[in-house]
């Protein structure tokens, strides 16, 4: 089965289950899916039953919903489409980071595999999307960075590099970027209060919710910001 054989809504469900699992969940609940996709729980239940019948998801009674091997393969096709489209919209068409997600949500159902391959090649096969999430390659291989939440992040005087924030949270990404923390950008920590990302190369402290993730800089502490 190819992902294009599925209705748009089924594609959305597979991608959303993958998204939820990617950020640390063992699986997705019907409540999670209904909320994230703006559906009633009864509608989400019927959609999941269809995916179960196709062998794409596994759903034990009262348990989490997880992807089967085939379901993960198809979900990664959609994730690849979405993240490459976001990257193309930002790099080549001048979209803002908080605009690309909604636009890619529409376009991902209409484009062909050939189009996705061409824009991937044209951009030099980027490793991450504008939110810092890893882009699966054409074989469905994902190379994920080693990250920790900012809430568990660097100590005062240590270096870090912001790698991303959860897919579907463009406002949080735009806010963190405006405060000096954006995917791929290195920064130093000037104070270390719990659940607050302090001033890191910007003029004042700022809370980031949900947590943005960072990769610790190699080589140990860096000089504190002055």
Image: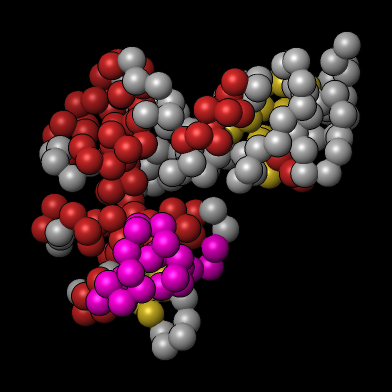
Tell me if 23 is positioned left or right of 86 in this view: right
**Residue depicted at 41% across the width and 85% down the height:** 60
In this orientation, does residue 52 appear?
A: no
Could you tell me what secondary structure mostly forms the magenta stretch? helix
**Residue depicted at 58% across the width and 33% down the height:** 163
Is residue 150 on the magenta stretch? no
Image spot of residue 68 (x, y percent): 34, 70
Q: Quadrant of residue 17?
A: bottom left
Whether 51 is drawn above or below 149: the answer is below
Of 220 and 23, the residue lying toward us: 23
Extreme residue in the top direction: 226
Is residue 26 on the magenta stretch? yes
Tell me if 208 is positioned left or right of 126 in this view: right
Tell me if 198 is positioned left or right of 121 in this view: right
In this orientation, does residue 86 appear?
A: yes
Whether 149 is drawn above or below 117: the answer is below
Whether 183 is drawn above or below 14: the answer is above
**Residue depicted at 54% across the width and 63% down the height:** 25
Of 31 and 54, the residue lying toward us: 31
Placement of the C terminus among the 4 image quadrants: top right
Placement of the N terminus among the 4 image quadrants: bottom left
**Residue depicted at 55% across the width and 36% down the height:** 172
Image spot of residue 6 (x, y percent): 15, 60
For the rendered model, the colour scheme is secondary structure
Extreme residue in the bottom direction: 61
Of 145 and 23, the residue lying toward us: 23
Q: How many numbered marks have been drawn onto this rendered protein structure?
A: 0
Image spot of residue 165 (x, y percent): 55, 39
Q: Which residues are magenta?
A: 25-46
Of 138 and 131, the residue lying toward us: 131
Image spot of residue 216 (x, y percent): 72, 33
């Amino acid at each position: 089965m190819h992902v294009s054989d599925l209705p748009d809504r089924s594609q959305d469900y597979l991608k959303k289950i993958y998204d939820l699992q990617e950020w640390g969940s063992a699986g997705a609940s019907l409540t999670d899916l209904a909320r994230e996709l703006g559906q009633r729980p009864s509608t989400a239940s019927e959609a999941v039953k269809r995916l179960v019948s196709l062998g794409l998801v596994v759903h034990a009674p009262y348990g989490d919903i997880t992807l089967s091997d085939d379901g993960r393969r198809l979900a990664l096709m959609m994730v690849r489409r979405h993240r490459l489209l976001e990257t193309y919209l930002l790099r080549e068409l001048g979209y803002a980071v908080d605009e690309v997600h909604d636009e890619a949500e529409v376009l991902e159902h209409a484009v062909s595999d050939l189009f996705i391959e061409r824009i991937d090649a044209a951009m030099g096969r980027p490793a991450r999307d504008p939110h810092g999430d890893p882009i699966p390659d054409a074989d469905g291989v994902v190379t994920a960075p080693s990250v920790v939440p900012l809430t568990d992040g660097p100590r005062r005087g240590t270096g870090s590099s912001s790698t991303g924030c959860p897919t579907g949270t463009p406002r949080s990404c735009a806010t963190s970027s405006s405060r000096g923390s954006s995917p791929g950008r290195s920064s130093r920590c000037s104070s270390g209060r719990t659940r607050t990302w302090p001033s890191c190369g910007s003029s004042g402290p700022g809370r980031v919710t949900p947590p943005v993730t960072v990769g610790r800089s190699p080589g140990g502490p860096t000089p504190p910001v002055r």
